Image (cartoon, helix red, strand yellow):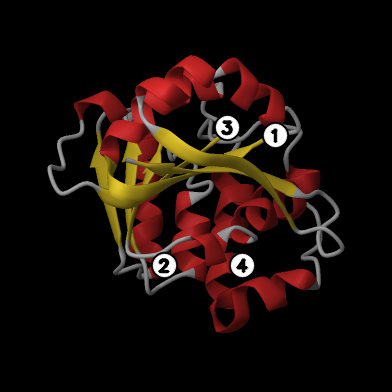
Amino acid sequence: MENEPEVAAELFGDRLELAREFTAALAREGEERGLIGPLELPRLWTRHILNSAIAAPLFHGTVADIGSGAGLPGIVLAIARPDVQWTLIEPMERRITWLTEQVAALGLTNVEVLRARAEEVRRPEGFDVVTARAVSALRTLIPLTAPLVKDGGELTLLKGLNAGNEIEAAQKQIKKFRLSDVRVEVLGEGMLPETTRVVRARVR
């Protein structure tokens, strides 16, 4: 497994020990439980934990993480931002079991785990921010996530190198779901070996 990068202490501060516990659990059980692939251990911190944690300052209020899976980014962000209320939404039972176990083991009182598909979630008050990481292309993701955002809230979606192209391909969905100020922000330059690209948009 990859050694803990020094920058982890900067990103997690006094929550670093919880991040270590979660990373160790994922390294120990992740492949066996079908949460991460066999090639991920040598880059677990860099590619997954820090890639998620670098986005922590972007969140506030109530946040839904769609397709939380192994807890990336939801568990990582909940560790980094105990002042934010997180709802981890995941349809698969074995992943729900994992998420529930980790929330309990880490003592995360700011996390709710919800077994559902995104389109099944009914929260009339909406969320301040909705996020997702490595779920699907933007044109598919917008119809799943935008309806969960309260009026004036934000989408903050962790994407890959093709984020800009995904925005271009999703113009129809951007217009339909009344997204504005759609942009790509690159996080972690000069700090992380791999930067994180985030697609952010306002929902009206």
Residue receiving disc 2: 106
Q: Please give the name of the residue rendered at 15% of the width and 36% of the height, measured from the top-left corner.
A: 122
Is residue 117 visible to the viewer in this orientation of the structure? no
Where residue 174 appears, x then y in whole percent?
Answer: 46, 25
Residue receiving disc 4: 20
Decide which of tag 4 and tag 1 comes sooner along the chain.
4
Tag 1: residue type?
A: Gly
Query: SS at mark 4?
Result: helix
Tag 4: residue type?
A: Arg
Residue receiving disc 3: 134
Location of residue 89 with respect to 3 vertically, above or below: above
Query: SS at mark 3?
Result: loop
Would you say the residues marked 2 and 4 are in contact, meaning their CB atoms lie under 8 Å apart? no
Residue receiving disc 1: 160
Location of residue 104 with respect to 156 vertically, above or below: below
Q: Please give the name of the residue rendered at 31% of the width and 66% of the height, measured from the top-left corner.
A: 110
Could you tell whether 133 is left or right of 189 in the image?
left
Decide which of tag 2 and tag 3 comes sooner along the chain.
2
Is residue 2 visible to the viewer in this orientation of the structure? yes
Q: Residues within 10 Å of mark 3 (few under 14, many from 20)?
A: some
Image label count: 4
Rounded to the nearest angstrom, the CA distance separating label 2 from label 4 is 10 Å
Q: Residues within 10 Å of mark 4 (few under 14, many from 20)?
A: some
Could you tell whether 121 is left or right of 62 in the image?
left
Would you say the residues marked 3 and 1 are in contact, meaning their CB atoms lie under 8 Å apart? yes
Would you say the residues marked 2 and 1 are in contact, meaning their CB atoms lie under 8 Å apart? no
Tag 3: residue type?
A: Ala
Q: Residues within 10 Å of mark 2 (few under 14, many from 20)?
A: some
Rounded to the nearest angstrom, the CA distance separating label 4 from label 1 is 25 Å
